[in-house]
Image: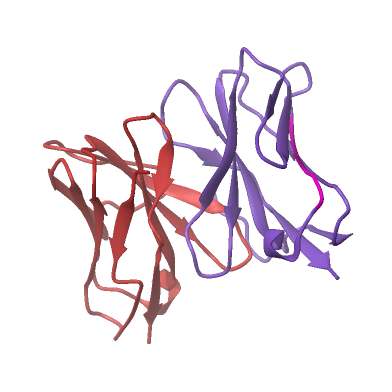
Protein backbone atom coordinates (compact mmCIF):
# COMPACT_ATOMS: atom_id res chain seq x y z
CA UNK A 1 0.00 0.00 0.00
CA UNK A 2 0.83 3.68 -0.01
CA UNK A 3 3.63 4.73 2.30
CA UNK A 4 4.42 8.10 3.82
CA UNK A 5 7.92 8.32 5.23
CA UNK A 6 8.78 10.84 7.92
CA UNK A 7 12.27 11.75 9.07
CA UNK A 8 13.72 12.00 11.64
CA UNK A 9 11.71 9.81 13.99
CA UNK A 10 13.04 11.72 16.94
CA UNK A 11 15.19 14.79 17.49
CA UNK A 12 16.54 16.67 20.51
CA UNK A 13 17.57 20.26 19.99
CA UNK A 14 18.65 23.21 22.06
CA UNK A 15 16.30 26.07 22.73
CA UNK A 16 16.63 28.76 20.08
CA UNK A 17 17.73 26.45 17.27
CA UNK A 18 15.72 25.33 14.25
CA UNK A 19 14.69 21.81 13.32
CA UNK A 20 13.55 20.49 9.95
CA UNK A 21 11.20 17.52 9.59
CA UNK A 22 10.73 15.81 6.23
CA UNK A 23 7.65 14.05 4.95
CA UNK A 24 7.85 11.99 1.77
CA UNK A 25 5.26 10.07 -0.19
CA UNK A 26 7.27 7.08 -1.35
CA UNK A 27 5.17 5.52 -4.09
CA UNK A 28 2.69 8.18 -5.03
CA UNK A 29 2.49 11.89 -5.69
CA UNK A 30 0.79 14.20 -3.25
CA UNK A 31 -0.15 17.75 -4.21
CA UNK A 32 -1.43 18.25 -0.69
CA UNK A 33 0.04 17.10 2.60
CA UNK A 34 -1.10 17.80 6.13
CA UNK A 35 0.88 18.51 9.28
CA UNK A 36 -0.44 17.63 12.72
CA UNK A 37 0.85 18.09 16.24
CA UNK A 38 0.03 15.81 19.11
CA UNK A 39 0.72 16.44 22.80
CA UNK A 40 0.85 13.52 25.27
CA UNK A 41 -2.49 11.83 25.85
CA UNK A 42 -4.21 14.20 23.45
CA UNK A 43 -5.60 14.01 19.97
CA UNK A 44 -3.99 15.10 16.73
CA UNK A 45 -4.44 18.78 15.98
CA UNK A 46 -4.13 20.03 12.43
CA UNK A 47 -1.45 22.68 12.11
CA UNK A 48 -1.38 23.38 8.40
CA UNK A 49 -2.14 22.13 4.92
CA UNK A 50 0.89 22.01 2.65
CA UNK A 51 0.25 22.68 -1.05
CA UNK A 52 2.77 21.80 -3.73
CA UNK A 53 4.03 24.90 -5.48
CA UNK A 54 2.11 27.37 -3.36
CA UNK A 55 1.87 28.69 0.17
CA UNK A 56 0.72 26.53 3.02
CA UNK A 57 -2.59 27.17 4.72
CA UNK A 58 -2.26 27.47 8.48
CA UNK A 59 -4.88 26.77 11.10
CA UNK A 60 -5.95 29.49 13.45
CA UNK A 61 -3.44 30.01 16.22
CA UNK A 62 -0.51 28.41 14.39
CA UNK A 63 2.32 30.86 13.76
CA UNK A 64 3.37 30.63 10.13
CA UNK A 65 6.69 32.36 10.78
CA UNK A 66 7.54 29.82 13.44
CA UNK A 67 6.41 26.71 11.61
CA UNK A 68 7.74 27.08 8.08
CA UNK A 69 6.31 24.68 5.54
CA UNK A 70 7.79 24.03 2.13
CA UNK A 71 6.24 21.70 -0.44
CA UNK A 72 8.73 21.98 -3.28
CA UNK A 73 7.92 18.72 -5.06
CA UNK A 74 5.04 16.29 -5.44
CA UNK A 75 6.67 13.86 -3.02
CA UNK A 76 8.22 16.05 -0.34
CA UNK A 77 6.95 18.47 2.25
CA UNK A 78 9.10 19.87 5.04
CA UNK A 79 8.20 21.47 8.35
CA UNK A 80 10.82 23.67 9.97
CA UNK A 81 10.34 24.64 13.59
CA UNK A 82 12.26 27.89 13.91
CA UNK A 83 13.72 29.21 17.16
CA UNK A 84 12.36 26.20 18.99
CA UNK A 85 11.43 26.47 22.65
CA UNK A 86 10.52 23.80 25.21
CA UNK A 87 6.80 24.41 24.65
CA UNK A 88 7.29 23.29 21.03
CA UNK A 89 8.23 19.83 22.26
CA UNK A 90 5.62 17.54 20.80
CA UNK A 91 4.92 14.70 18.38
CA UNK A 92 4.65 15.99 14.82
CA UNK A 93 2.90 13.85 12.22
CA UNK A 94 2.39 14.36 8.50
CA UNK A 95 -0.28 12.88 6.26
CA UNK A 96 -1.10 12.66 2.58
CA UNK A 97 -4.00 11.33 0.51
CA UNK A 98 -2.91 8.37 -1.50
CA UNK A 99 -4.24 7.44 -4.97
CA UNK A 100 -6.99 5.44 -3.28
CA UNK A 101 -8.08 8.69 -1.59
CA UNK A 102 -7.18 7.40 1.84
CA UNK A 103 -5.27 9.54 4.31
CA UNK A 104 -1.96 7.86 5.02
CA UNK A 105 0.18 8.97 7.93
CA UNK A 106 3.88 9.11 8.56
CA UNK A 107 5.36 7.48 11.62
CA UNK A 108 5.76 10.80 13.40
CA UNK A 109 8.67 12.84 14.76
CA UNK A 110 9.21 13.24 18.48
CA UNK A 111 10.70 16.71 19.05
CA UNK A 112 12.26 17.51 22.39
CA UNK A 113 13.59 21.01 22.97
CA UNK A 114 15.98 21.38 25.89
CA UNK B 1 -7.71 25.37 20.34
CA UNK B 2 -5.92 22.61 22.17
CA UNK B 3 -7.17 20.97 25.30
CA UNK B 4 -4.73 20.87 28.17
CA UNK B 5 -4.41 18.23 30.83
CA UNK B 6 -7.09 15.86 29.57
CA UNK B 7 -6.77 12.13 30.04
CA UNK B 8 -8.00 9.81 27.38
CA UNK B 9 -11.06 7.76 28.32
CA UNK B 10 -10.08 4.13 28.77
CA UNK B 11 -11.96 1.01 27.82
CA UNK B 12 -10.77 -2.18 29.45
CA UNK B 13 -11.91 -5.50 27.98
CA UNK B 14 -10.98 -9.10 28.42
CA UNK B 15 -9.29 -10.97 25.63
CA UNK B 16 -11.88 -12.62 23.43
CA UNK B 17 -14.66 -10.20 24.29
CA UNK B 18 -16.11 -7.71 21.82
CA UNK B 19 -15.18 -4.03 22.12
CA UNK B 20 -17.27 -1.03 21.22
CA UNK B 21 -15.68 2.38 20.96
CA UNK B 22 -17.88 5.41 20.44
CA UNK B 23 -17.32 8.80 18.92
CA UNK B 24 -19.45 11.90 18.49
CA UNK B 25 -18.74 14.31 15.67
CA UNK B 26 -19.91 17.85 15.26
CA UNK B 27 -19.68 18.82 11.60
CA UNK B 28 -22.87 17.90 9.77
CA UNK B 29 -21.08 18.64 6.47
CA UNK B 30 -18.65 15.77 7.00
CA UNK B 31 -19.15 13.03 4.46
CA UNK B 32 -16.24 10.74 5.18
CA UNK B 33 -15.32 9.09 8.47
CA UNK B 34 -12.37 6.98 9.46
CA UNK B 35 -11.20 5.02 12.47
CA UNK B 36 -7.51 4.95 13.24
CA UNK B 37 -5.44 2.93 15.67
CA UNK B 38 -2.39 4.55 17.21
CA UNK B 39 0.24 2.69 19.16
CA UNK B 40 2.61 4.52 21.45
CA UNK B 41 5.18 6.60 19.57
CA UNK B 42 3.75 5.79 16.14
CA UNK B 43 1.57 7.48 13.57
CA UNK B 44 -2.12 6.60 13.16
CA UNK B 45 -2.88 3.38 11.31
CA UNK B 46 -6.00 3.08 9.15
CA UNK B 47 -8.59 0.60 10.37
CA UNK B 48 -11.80 1.19 8.47
CA UNK B 49 -13.71 4.00 6.83
CA UNK B 50 -17.28 4.80 5.90
CA UNK B 51 -18.95 7.40 3.72
CA UNK B 52 -22.05 9.31 4.70
CA UNK B 53 -24.25 7.44 2.25
CA UNK B 54 -23.80 4.28 4.32
CA UNK B 55 -24.69 3.41 7.90
CA UNK B 56 -22.64 0.27 8.35
CA UNK B 57 -19.46 -1.19 6.97
CA UNK B 58 -17.65 -4.35 7.93
CA UNK B 59 -14.04 -5.34 7.71
CA UNK B 60 -12.02 -8.14 9.17
CA UNK B 61 -13.09 -8.33 12.84
CA UNK B 62 -14.17 -4.69 12.74
CA UNK B 63 -17.46 -2.97 12.02
CA UNK B 64 -18.15 0.75 11.81
CA UNK B 65 -21.63 2.13 12.40
CA UNK B 66 -22.65 5.64 11.42
CA UNK B 67 -25.72 7.41 12.77
CA UNK B 68 -25.97 10.74 10.99
CA UNK B 69 -29.11 11.74 12.85
CA UNK B 70 -27.27 12.02 16.15
CA UNK B 71 -23.80 12.48 14.63
CA UNK B 72 -22.46 9.33 16.19
CA UNK B 73 -19.86 6.86 15.01
CA UNK B 74 -18.89 3.57 16.61
CA UNK B 75 -16.21 0.97 16.08
CA UNK B 76 -16.87 -2.61 17.03
CA UNK B 77 -13.97 -5.02 17.37
CA UNK B 78 -14.86 -8.69 17.55
CA UNK B 79 -12.89 -11.17 19.64
CA UNK B 80 -10.53 -8.51 20.96
CA UNK B 81 -6.88 -9.56 21.14
CA UNK B 82 -3.95 -8.19 23.17
CA UNK B 83 -2.53 -6.70 19.96
CA UNK B 84 -5.62 -4.52 19.73
CA UNK B 85 -4.47 -2.54 22.78
CA UNK B 86 -3.86 1.00 21.55
CA UNK B 87 -5.52 4.40 21.32
CA UNK B 88 -8.36 4.62 18.82
CA UNK B 89 -9.37 7.84 17.11
CA UNK B 90 -12.30 8.64 14.93
CA UNK B 91 -11.74 11.26 12.27
CA UNK B 92 -14.07 13.16 9.97
CA UNK B 93 -13.51 14.97 6.72
CA UNK B 94 -15.83 17.45 5.06
CA UNK B 95 -15.49 16.93 1.31
CA UNK B 96 -11.86 15.97 1.08
CA UNK B 97 -10.32 18.53 3.36
CA UNK B 98 -7.98 17.72 6.20
CA UNK B 99 -9.12 15.28 8.81
CA UNK B 100 -10.46 16.44 12.15
CA UNK B 101 -9.75 13.97 14.90
CA UNK B 102 -11.85 13.07 17.90
CA UNK B 103 -10.44 12.93 21.41
CA UNK B 104 -9.49 9.26 21.32
CA UNK B 105 -10.15 6.22 23.47
CA UNK B 106 -7.49 4.04 25.02
CA UNK B 107 -8.32 0.35 24.64
CA UNK B 108 -6.69 -2.01 27.11
CA UNK B 109 -7.06 -5.73 26.52
CA UNK B 110 -6.44 -7.91 29.53
CA UNK B 111 -5.68 -11.64 29.37
The residue range painted magenta reads B73-79
As drawn, B104 above or below A80: above
As drawn, A68 above or below B54: below
As drawn, B17 above or below A74: below
Q: Which color scheme is applied? A: by chain
Residue at 66% across / 49% down in the picture? B103
Residue B76 is one of the magenta-drawn residues: yes
Report the number of numbered marks.
0
Q: Nearer the viewer, residue B84 or B79?
A: B79
Is residue B53 in view from this perspective?
A: yes
Magenta stretch, main secondary structure class: strand
**Residue B44 image position (x, y, % from top left):** 51, 53
Residue at 51% across / 70% down in the picture? B41
Which tint is chain B? purple
Residue A58 is one of the magenta-drawn residues: no
Which tint is chain A? red
**Residue A18 image position (x, y, % from top left):** 21, 73
Q: Nearer the viewer, residue B46 or B31?
A: B46
Residue at 55% across / 20% down in the picture? B31
Q: Residue furthest top?
A: B53
Q: Quadrant of the N terminus of chain A?
A: top left
Residue B28 lies left or right of residue B18; in this view the side is left
As drawn, B66 above or below B111: above
Q: Nearer the viewer, residue A94 or B77?
A: B77
**Residue A113 image position (x, y, % from top left):** 37, 81
Q: Nearer the viewer, residue B73 or B47?
A: B47
**Residue B78 image position (x, y, % from top left):** 80, 45
Amino acid sequence: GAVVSQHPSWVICKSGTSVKIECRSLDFQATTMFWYRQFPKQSLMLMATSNEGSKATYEQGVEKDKFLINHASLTLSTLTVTSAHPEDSSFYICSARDPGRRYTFGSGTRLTVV
Amino acid sequence: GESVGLHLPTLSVQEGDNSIINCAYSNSASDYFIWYKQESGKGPQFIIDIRSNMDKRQGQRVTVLLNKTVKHLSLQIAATQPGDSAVYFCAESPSGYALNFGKGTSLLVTP
